[in-house]
Image: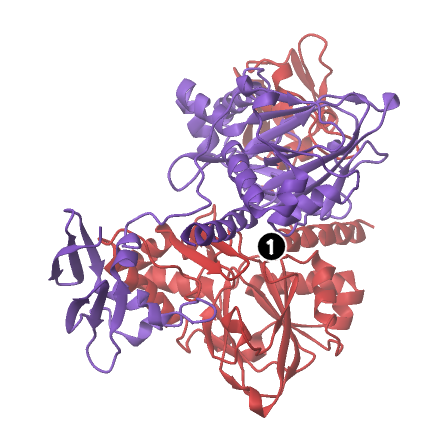
Chain colours: A purple, B red
Amino acid sequence: MTDMACLRLETRQLRLDWADGESHAFPYIWLRDTDPAGFHPRTGERVFDLTSVPLDLAPRAVRVEGAILVVDWPGDDAASRFDLCWLRENRPGAPRPDPAGVETVAWRGELGAGGVPRARAAEVLQDDAALADWLCRGKAYGLSIIEGLDDDVEAGCAVARRIGFLRETNFGRTFEVVSKPDPNNLAYTSDALPLHTDLTNQELPPGWQFLHCLANEAEGGGSVFCDGVAVAEDLARADPTAFELLASVDIPFRFHDAETDIRARKTVIRRGLDGRVDEICFNAHLADILDIDPAIMPDYYAAYRRLMQMTRDSAYLVTLKLKAGEMVVFDNRRVLHGRAAFDPSTGFRHLRGCYVDRGEFDSRMRVLARAADRAEAA
Amino acid sequence: MTDMACLRLETRQLRLDWADGESHAFPYIWLRDTDPAGFHPRTGERVFDLTSVPLDLAPRAVRVEGAILVVDWPGDDAASRFDLCWLRENRPGAPRPDPAGVETVAWRGELGAGGVPRARAAEVLQDDAALADWLCRGKAYGLSIIEGLDDDVEAGCAVARRIGFLRETNFGRTFEVVSKPDPNNLAYTSDALPLHTDLTNQELPPGWQFLHCLANEAEGGGSVFCDGVAVAEDLARADPTAFELLASVDIPFRFHDAETDIRARKTVIRRGLDGRVDEICFNAHLADILDIDPAIMPDYYAAYRRLMQMTRDSAYLVTLKLKAGEMVVFDNRRVLHGRAAFDPSTGFRHLRGCYVDRGEFDSRMRVLARAADRAEAA
């Protein structure tokens, strides 16, 4: 795989032709900037100073010593040494492998409660391999259930902290979903909550949400989920103009109470760098007075209302009646959640929630993959 | 200002012609969705359900009663009532007033240490008007100094908490900038740090940074700042192609140590929705192996290196030698910071840092503006 057929010094770049017929270009300035000796031995941070070399830098000579490419630079600059295998894998223009890059499984109502990935709290808490396996399945679906949690208000957060620190918001680091007097948020009532994503009024809405069920004895109060990626993909096929409006026109969101007034503008559908849907910001409660151009408003409302209807269509919905000791974990930026109204006079309903952001989630997947790699190598 | 000349029911919208000659369109569906009665009286969240009305909804009648516009809907739907003054201010297509919307003052080296906005800790801690004034001046420049802090490691965070909760990162909720053994970050050495913004490897890099100087007795260790907006604007004029590359090509950033591996892709220059530069992500230490198309790489390196040279050009730099009891506060997503190397054998240098995100900062400005509005009205 790293056998080389030919090595050519072109004007601004080195070209390596591999024995398997592939050919790759390595600009000289990239080779100098990427020299492994230019990174701090302890912190891994780049310490090489790009301004210390001219942009038209070219090597005096390049040679291969076994599996190592050696590049001699002009003047006093030390030679750069690259492992050929590493060089091929990290070549310019190639996608970098990422252990957190799980293929998304778009799901619809037929998934059913039985199809939602599940894991046991004790295993996830104690076993890194079980944790890694749960994170991988949970990320593919954006939704999973942890079973067997202790009857302790801290038990859900303990699982979340296995991934990373909790994302703080204006509602605190944890929040109690109970019906309470003088609520500053509809979650804290016994009203039905149509499907939504949380805190769309934040520049970065929270990533993974953890809702630990401590009690669910009231009549009603079932939890409903819908995969925003599936809905958006279907909308793109059924009504490309509606999809395009929702993916390109940013609208205002706002939450305000006595202590805060947090606002953000964003599109309801967001595409990632690869063009695929990677985020849904949908929350009718937090949608501020719509301020877009009145000329496009009727079409925008039509698109927005169509998406809203899809999020309530049973073809997309999975309903879970959480039991005490269960926790639902979902990607709040992908999977919409809601609940049926409940009657607080018939029993107590108490969920305890917290968030861990996507960055910490993916970081944990990568760190756990290192251990798996070491185990494999041993 | 809200005297009306004419009220016209068009096909899909109401048109109001005001006595001053302005004319505004109000789509019927917007009027229904924006009815003040459709918002929860306690939480302010929208509870009106858009799917409960048809998209081609049109009023039976519209009339003006004093300063109130009354819209009668078909069927059993209750009439909507709008204050005309509110309606004009919040009309579709109009920019919404935002008390956090401060005009950016781009600055260069001639600002000098003497030109940096300053405030006294005791005043900011005790007086809401002083706090509001400091936030407004600090936001315009993206940089300010708080003087007269207690010699207490918590004193800087206490000022930050007047704005909002601290943004947690993988380095904790607060961090100590001291030279220490086995550092996992170059900040924790005595090396010089070229100008950069922090944690560009995060999906949302921290917003406002607070660095409280507890001791600065070592030789060297001066703090250097540069306004990324000024640099980017000058680059856009001097070399539009370089600016465009830096504003459109996303590059990978990464931080990894024993516990984390946090990655994000972003452009070095980011424009806001109004097209103006609103963020700089520049950190050569955290820039990962560049993986962009090798065909554009030489041009990209030229643009990136040119920006890097500008951030080191004294024409842009303001140097501060912080004294114990001073704290520098800056928008980490706009203002680059760095430091001269210092000699830890000549004295102790200790800064304590924390972050508060832009969302909390702007929220505090808006909440403080309410009190100012009330005081003005009284």
Residue at left offset 26%, top offset 69%: A81
Looking at the image, can residue A179 be seen?
yes
Q: In the rendered view, would you say A192 is above or below A51?
A: above
Image-based side of B215 in relation to A241, left or right: right
Image-based side of A22 in relation to A300, left or right: left
Residue at left offset 42%, top offset 18%: A238
Under circle 1, the secondary element is helix
The residue indicated by pointer 1 is B358
Give the crowd class for mark 1: few <14, some 14-19, many >=20 residues within 10 Å.
Answer: many
Looking at the image, can residue A289 be seen?
no
- Chain bearing tag 1 is B
Residue placed furthest toward the top: B75
Q: In the rendered view, would you say B213 is above or below B295?
A: below
Image-based side of B248 in relation to A270, left or right: left
User: Which x, y percent locates residue B191?
Assistant: 48, 79
Q: Nearer the viewer, residue A235 or B162?
A: A235
